[in-house]
Image (cartoon, rainbow, N blue to C red):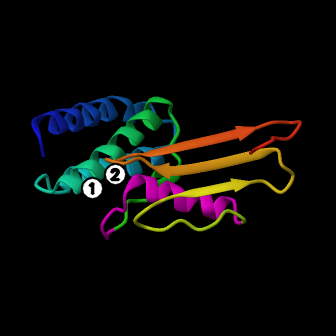
Amino acid sequence: MGSKDAEEFRYALQDIAQYIPRLDCPFDRVRCSEWTRKLGSLADDNLELCKIKNDYAQYLRIQVRNHCLHGPFEHPPPDKALPPLSEYLGGIMCKEVPFLPKMGPINPVLHHKSPDGRAYVSAKQIPGGGVLCYMAVSPDGLVLK
């Protein structure tokens, strides 16, 4: 892991540790601690694993600061390897909205317009890493060309 990545991860864990006691639910505090242990135990020598580790840490940091855990953090961390965060969140979206097309594990891309035409969601992988997500909602319906 590069020094910048290691520093970013360390700061995220410090921030998370500061906000864990402020979570209302004791079960959330325990899950949050389990997740920080899991993320801290992941190896630093693999660039892809470092990216996954930092993505989850930053996402957990945002949630802990807002006193609410959701998504992957509603459950204890898996014993198996963590998938990329974009893939995991895409899977959650597909479970929550069953009419969305399923996303692949390597190239998460989806485009969907709701049957009533009032909502549109698109997620596309960005070259070099990351995912661009776009969602539009309109009470009058959307005109997409």
Q: Label 2 is placed on what type of residue?
A: Trp
Instruction: Work out whether residue 24 or residue 73 is closer to the camera in this orientation and state it.
Output: 73
Which residue corresponds to mark 1?
Answer: 38
Q: Say if mark 1 contacts mark 2, CB within 8 Å.
A: yes
Majority secondary structure in the magenta region:
helix
Which residue corresponds to mark 2?
Answer: 35
Of all residues shown, which one is farthest toward the front?
145
Q: How many marks?
A: 2
Q: Label 1 is placed on what type of residue?
A: Lys
Residue 91 in the magenta stretch? The answer is: yes
Q: Residue at x 60, y 41 (%)?
A: 134
Residue 93 in the magenta stretch? The answer is: yes
Q: Is residue 9 above or below residue 38?
A: above
Q: Residue at x 36, y 38 (%)?
A: 58
- The picture places residue 101, in percent across and down from the top left corner, at 64, 66
Magenta stretch: give its range: 79-98
Q: Quadrant of the C terminus?
A: top right
